[in-house]
Amino acid sequence: MPSPTSMNLRCLLRSAAIVSFITSASLLFGQSPATVVVDAGHGGYDRGGVPGQRIVEKDKTLDVALRLRRILQADGYKVIMTRDQDVFVPLGTRVTIANSYRNAIFVSIHFNCSTRLGANGIETYYYSNGSAELAASIHRNVVASAPTENRGIRRRGFFVLRRAAVPAVLVECGFLTNPTEGGLAQTDGYRQQLAEQIARGIRRQPPAVSRPLTPSLAAAGQLGPQPFNADANRDFVRADAVRERSSKSKSSRHRKSSKSSHRTTSQEKKESSSNDEETPHKKKTPKKKAEE
Ligand SMILES: [Zn+2]
């Protein structure tokens, strides 16, 4: 029969073990949010891409998003889709959905486009500082397994990223206008691979390999490391977030931004026109008003 002292000790040890378990569980929980809001870019009359684009972006984003849902649900995540069929969902609604879950993360899936066939590669966007680490984790995993260029991680004020109150990331999974990447995106296996790599990033798993930025981009003289992580900043491309300047310009930007998840400010459009013609901001998508 144990003495009262040894019982107290055992009790104490058990309590310590329980506290330790709870602490580890909350740490794990903190790193991997239970809710993932998966956002398939475009939908309905908003096809995404450039006019006349052969491979329709909205279909590919939805396919990858549905694959990602299956993977995350199997992992035990709660997954909320902003759309799970070919319908148009306003950007404001997408953000409202994301912001209605505490401890959620928002992952928006897109494919890139350009009038230049040679434009290629994968790039990932974030806006708030609290999203940078998630952006890096997803980007490095997707890039690690993709046979294409690493275009880097960029901070940009896209509507869905700017308005999200939770960590929010937008992944451009390659150029549908590029013959090689467009061909890959049309295969089930590659889209499944994209979904699996995004899931790895959400789980914060380390990438299989670390890849530097594509040399041509690095040589363009526009790139530099962001202060986010001095040890692993080779993927970060300098792209400052744009500040809101006046209520008038804010409201005009708001309308502009609302047309597509790709839309950003007029200043950014100007920058991307002069600096980086492959960015998706130039395209002329739906004439209809997207929101409000
Ligand atoms: Zn898109």
Image (spheres, rainbow, N blue to C red):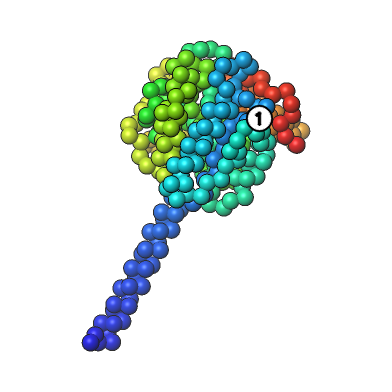
Q: Position of residue 44 (x, y in %)?
A: 66, 30
Q: In what element is the residue under mark 1?
A: loop
- In percent of the image, x 41 and y 32: which residue is there? 193
Which residue is label 1 attached to?
A: 44
- In percent of the image, x 48 and y 19: which residue is there? 182
> Where's the C terminus, which quadrant?
top right
Q: Nearer the viewer, residue 23 or 67?
A: 67
- Mark 1 burial class by Cα count in 10 Å: few <14, some 14-19, many 20+: few
- In percent of the image, x 41 and y 54: which residue is there? 28
Quadrant location of residue 53?
A: top right
Tag 1: amino acid: Gly
> Where's the N terminus, which quadrant?
bottom left
Above/below status of 12 relative to 105 = below
Quadrant location of residue 108?
A: top right
Q: Position of residue 271 (x, y in %)?
A: 59, 21
Residue sitting farthest toward the left: 1
